[in-house]
Amino acid sequence: MPTVHEFRRHPRIESRQLPLGIFEEGRRLSGVEINDISLGGMGVLSSERLSEGQEIDFSVVLPGGEMKGRGVVRWAQPFDLGYRGGVEFKKLGFWQRRRLGSFVGGTLEWGLKTRAAHFFDWALITGTVAVTGLIVLDRFGVSLRDLSDLARFFAWL
């Protein structure tokens, strides 16, 4: 038997338990399920015909919420009583991609490991808290100069 070499950019995981909806031009395809999923796309099984280049909208329920996006069928072939194919994600929002990255445990689109991505989450939250704090201080009439003077006072002690 010949050896098959796969050249994948993203690790995939088998996941037939995830609820999946595939829509073509607003019509929901029947009898579809996920075979596997990665950050780049998903393998699907369908009782309806899939064809290469077919554009679809999809909805997958992941732990933590629903992921909606748009994809393109990159390959399709008859399988059992239906079809199987590979769907490449084309339009997927930032937070959907983050949720998917947490689920599959791979790398994010720009090559960051999820651990590094958690650092950026922390930085985003910290920055949000800092800006919110400045807004609250401004409401009470405290300026940055007042904070600077206060910091120098405590440094002097």
Image: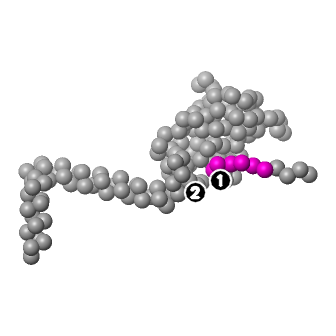
Residue 89, picture quadrant: top right
User: Of the residues under marks 1 and 2, which one precedes in the sequence?
Assistant: 1
Q: Residues within 10 Å of mark 2 (few under 14, many from 20)?
A: some
> In the image, is residue 8 part of the stretch drawn in magenta?
yes
Residue at left 70%, top 35%? Answer: 74
The kind of secondary structure element at disc 2 is loop
- The answer to whether mark 1 and mark 2 are in CB contact below 8 A is yes
Residue tagged by mark 2?
A: 105
Residue 21, picture quadrant: top right
Residue at left 61%, top 23%? Answer: 25
Q: Which mark is residue 11?
A: 1
| Residue 79, image x, y percentages | 82, 38
If the image is split into quadrants, where does the C terminus sit?
bottom left
- Residue 46 visible within the image: no
Count of numbered circles on the image: 2
Q: Which mark is residue 79?
A: none
Q: CA–CA distance between discs 1 and 2?
A: 8 Å
Instruction: Tell me the amino acid under the disc marked 1.
Output: Pro
